[in-house]
Amino acid sequence: MAAESCHSRSLSWLVKSCIPADPARHIAVPVPVPVPVPAVGTTQPPPPPSSAPIYALPDDLLLECLARVPRASLPPLPAVCRRFAALLSSSAFLHVRRVHAQFQPSLLAVSVSDHGTVAQTLLQFNTSTPTVDVAALPLPQTLLHCSGAAFAHARAVVLGREVFLIGRGATLCVDALTGAARACAPTLFPRKKFAAAAVGDRIYVAGGSARTAAVEEYVPEADAWRVVAEAPRRRYGCAGAGAGGVFYVAGGVAVSGEGARTLEAHVCAGSVDALHVASGSWARPRALPGGGCVVGACGVGEHLYVVASHAVELSFWRWCGGVGRGGEGRGWGGWVALEAPSMPRGSVGLGMAVRVAMAGLGTERVAAVVSAAAVRGHNSGAGALEGIVLLYEIASGKWSRVPDLPPGFRRAAYAGVEC
């Protein structure tokens, strides 16, 4: 537990946390310091007053120090004292850190194994070559319920600096900067391979269950879920996105009781349902031009971005996410074909199951993590692919390939964060 106050040793610890611990470079060498002996008959001057503790520094000066700490050294700082914890969780800390250009758009990948082992990968994108940082999240096993099975197909949703990891009957909230985690209320209905996204300051989930068509809304202040609508279709394996005040539920297969008709399943795979959260009304389904199955979706600003699979190739589309007159979405936007993702030759073909996890990185980029594997029972000549990371620059309309994810992130949850 954090202490009530800090002392001068805290400042020394803070400075040391910014310096890499390299024994080859930092070797402590004792140096004798001579102590002067006062002459006989002279009065020894009083000792100088001790330096003021770090706790006495004003908030603005202390924030300037904390904002310069590397992200890798931030997790232990809230435990130094309660004042550190309060300042690190404040909006002023984010403002100062942003002023000093300490934030970079990043792709966060969180993978939880069946045994509760958590791995975190952070891809940071700047003007130079993207870097990959792999680290373990310090999540207590009590938060993981001693098993990661609940988070095997989790969805990651970002609200501000917090990443909500939503699993099957369990929810975690992780601070993207400090790594502090807490357990949150689970969804009202257990879901798997569902759609989840943030719209404004709320989180919405839909699909992933044959028992209910309910759309749930999460209110962070109350740490509670509530049903706000009924989805027009019960989708499984769908993708979620939020843009322009709209919650999108894209792709997947139709599930209803003992099964769904073939026609309904086809309509689900190539269409998008849109819920205007302010009015609670659904727009008519938006089918992709030319068919295809939606395999990934994300929102950036007012737009929805979708990746579709067409058996032997991928396509990329943008839909305007603004709300039309009357809030019903009539007469607004339309599908715009964009440059297709630059996949390696022969990586997508017949008999291949393609999965694309997408996340917006700020307002300028879209990240797509592509995985492809042969469907059971098919003899595909293409080899399995896992963790290919592609980056789309919205301004130039071009895709590029960046470093792949390390092995072991096949079922990871992805989110775009600032770190």
Image (tube, rainbow, N blue to C red):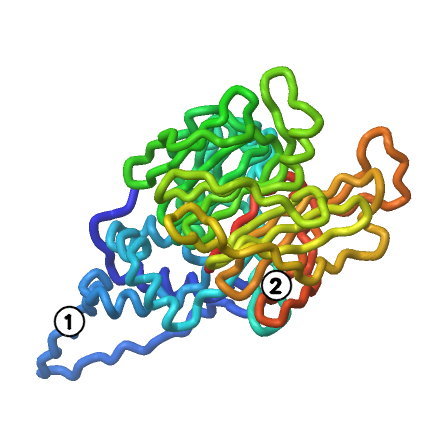
Residue name at image x 71 percent, y 53 percent: 315
Rendered location of residue 25, percent (x, y):
55, 70
Left or right of 316: which side holds 323? left
Task: Describe the element under mark 1 as helix, strand or loop.
Answer: loop
Tell me, yes or no, if residue 209 can be seen here.
Answer: yes
Residue name at image x 56 percent, y 22 percent: 210
Residue 268 in the image: above or below residue 96: above
Residue 316 in the image: above or below residue 236: below
Residue 290 in the image: above or below residue 26: above
Sequence-first tag of 2 and 1: 1
Residue furthest out toward the top: 258
Numbered circle sitting on residue 49: 1
Q: Quadrant of residue 399?
A: bottom right
Rendered location of residue 276, percent (x, y):
42, 44
Residue name at image x 11 percent, y 75 percent: 46
Task: Describe the element under mark 2 as helix, strand or loop.
Answer: strand
Numbered circle sitting on residue 131: 2
**Residue type for callout 1:** Pro
Which residue occupies the foreground of this view, 388 or 37?
388
